């Protein structure tokens, strides 16, 4: 799969940069979009080569991040339009997809998107059972049953009021 | 898709901090590191208060002293175990802080402030005397507690005076109106970064009394003073003076007049940058009133349940 945000052959022109995902797909991105990521900006300042290889971000996730960066680099769009794009961007996405996104935005240091995705994840998580949270994040319960019960007892008010979900 | 998606701890923290408070508390039971992340910021950082319920018993001689960034500071005096309690109503967490010596006297002035430079909360404590001896009644010690270091420091010995409740924090300094029978009222300021003390003058010579009440306020980010005018019949008005340039006496400007309130009303302070708080006696009940300085409309009132500091 090759995706470009400009017409023409896939060569890095001035003011463009090629980003390669861990599974080998290449994306042509304008420099103004790339530098919205603090990590990419640093890489571009340090090296001549206009090809950046990201060894831990897959093509689907990278495509989403680049769509976000390109939209936010577009001076023709108003802030209101960008805000509604952000909301649209995270709505309806699976929790798994959001996990890879939040990880990618953390690696690439795209703070605004990282917060937007984290907020969306928190919205999904807020009424879930603790077991659900452990499963989704692959976290081992390192409490003894007694210790867990004790912590629960101390914040009893947080547990009394609603049916929590497990799916 | 990648097979494995282990989120690093700091990314998980970013997500946890976006949770509503009840969900966050439940997440403490996920694992020990979630517990630690939640606890770290539950003590001081939260703006998610839905209801306030005291998590501890109010002892005899407890007083509400001050508040800062949603943290409430109370003093509890039950005999030998005098202590100050910091309480976050949003998270229902509290922390008891012992004082260098017990509250032996009636007069204890306590303020809570935040220093952005130090990223630290500080408690200012002015007990009227440490030991009951005649000499000590002429002076008061000023103590400063740093939440970060967890220790008290005696900073200064002040001449004996009254300090009006509550103190007001702005520009990283805490401000108290101090009244001394032989001199004019002044503003004591304590720099919460350097612990240095300084006095500021009020706009004009003023002696507070039952009829002439005064309070400090923060209006549009400037230190302000709310000063009562003469009683007319059964009511009185208040003038709002704003110190346009911080620390410069000549920059005090009379900006607003609000009222009328009853002749026994007194100002307490301000909130939301443009609203003044008063305590007044309305329909046979002590009430907190909130008055907008621009519209001079009372937009909120509630009964006073807790006896407040004199």
Image: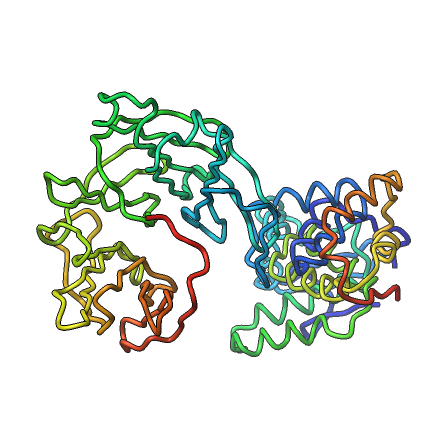
Q: How is the image coloured?
A: rainbow
Question: In the rendered view of the protein, which quadrant contains the N terminus of chain B?
Answer: bottom right
- Residue B106: where, in percent of width, then height? 34, 37
Task: Return the residue found at the far front.
Answer: B284
- Residue A80: where, in percent of width, then height? 54, 77
Identify whether B17 is placed above or below B195.
Answer: below
Q: Residue B160, located in which quarter of the rendered image?
A: top left
Residue at position x 14%, y 55% from top?
B251
Q: Residue A47, located in which quarter of the rendered image?
A: top right
Task: Return the residue found at the far right.
Answer: B3
Observer able to see residue A14 = no
Observer able to see residue B38 = yes
Taking A116 as reference, is A10 left or right?
A: right
The image shows a total of numbered marks equal to 0
- Residue B88: where, in percent of width, then height? 55, 50
- Residue B264: where, in percent of width, then height? 24, 63
Q: Nearer the viewer, residue A95 or B159?
A: B159
Q: Nearer the viewer, residue B123 or A17?
A: B123
Identify whether B246 is placed above or below B79.
Answer: below
Q: Nearer the viewer, residue B282 or B229?
A: B282
Residue at position x 46%, y 60% from top?
B305
Taking B179 as reference, is B294 left or right?
A: right
Q: Nearer the viewer, residue B137 or B169?
A: B137
Taking B65 as reference, is A144 left or right?
A: right
Residue at position x 38%, y 40% from top?
B110
């Amino acid at each position: 799969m090759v995706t470009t945000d400009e017409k023409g052959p896939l060569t890095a022109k001035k003011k463009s940069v090629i980003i390669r995902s861990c599974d080998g797909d290449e994306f042509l991105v304008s420099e103004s979009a790339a530098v919205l990521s603090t990590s990419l900006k640093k890489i571009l300042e340090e090296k001549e080569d206009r090809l950046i290889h990201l060894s831990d971000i897959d093509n689907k996730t990278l495509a989403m991040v680049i769509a976000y960066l390109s939209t936010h680099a577009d001076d023709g769009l108003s802030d209101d339009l960008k805000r509604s794009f952000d909301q649209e961007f995270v709505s309806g996405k699976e929790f798994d997809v959001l996990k890879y996104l939040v990880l990618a935005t953390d690696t690439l240091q795209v703070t605004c998107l990282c917060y937007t995705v984290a907020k969306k994840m928190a919205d999904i998580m807020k009424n879930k059972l603790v077991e659900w949270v452990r499963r989704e994040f692959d976290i081992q319960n390192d409490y003894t049953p007694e210790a867990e019960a004790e912590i629960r007892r101390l914040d009893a008010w947080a547990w009394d009021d609603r049916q929590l979900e497990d799916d | 898709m990648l097979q494995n998606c282990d989120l690093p701890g700091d990314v998980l923290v970013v997500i946890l901090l976006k949770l509503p408070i009840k969900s966050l508390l439940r997440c403490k039971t996920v694992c020990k590191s979630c517990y630690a992340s939640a606890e770290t910021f539950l003590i001081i950082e939260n703006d998610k208060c839905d209801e306030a319920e005291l998590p501890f018993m109010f002892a005899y001689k407890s007083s509400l002293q001050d508040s800062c960034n949603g943290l409430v500071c109370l003093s509890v005096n039950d005999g030998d175990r005098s202590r100050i309690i910091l309480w976050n109503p949003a998270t229902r967490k509290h922390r008891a802080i012992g004082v260098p010596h017990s509250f032996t006297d009636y007069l204890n002035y306590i303020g809570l402030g935040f220093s952005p430079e130090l990223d630290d909360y500080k408690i200012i404590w002015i007990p009227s005397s440490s030991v009951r001896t005649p000499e000590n009644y002429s002076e008061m010690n000023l103590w400063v507690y740093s939440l970060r270091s967890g220790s008290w420091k005696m900073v200064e010995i002040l001449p004996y005076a009254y300090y009006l409740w509550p103190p007001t924090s702005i520009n990283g300094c805490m401000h108290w109106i101090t009244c001394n029978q032989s001199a004019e009222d002044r503003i004591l300021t304590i720099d919460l970064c350097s612990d240095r003390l300084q006095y500021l003058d009020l706009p004009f010579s003023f002696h507070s009394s039952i009829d002439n009440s005064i309070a400090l306020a923060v209006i549009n980010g400037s230190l302000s003073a709310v000063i009562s005018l003469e009683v007319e019949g059964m009511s009185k008005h208040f003038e709002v003076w704003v110190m346009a340039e911080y620390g410069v006496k000549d920059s005090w400007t009379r900006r607003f007049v609000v009222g009328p309130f009853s002749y026994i009303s007194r100002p307490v302070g301000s909130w939301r940058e443009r609203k003044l708080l008063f305590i007044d006696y309305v329909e046979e009940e002590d009430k907190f009133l909130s008055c907008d300085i621009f519209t001079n409309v009372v937009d909120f009132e509630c009964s006073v349940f807790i006896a407040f500091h004199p």
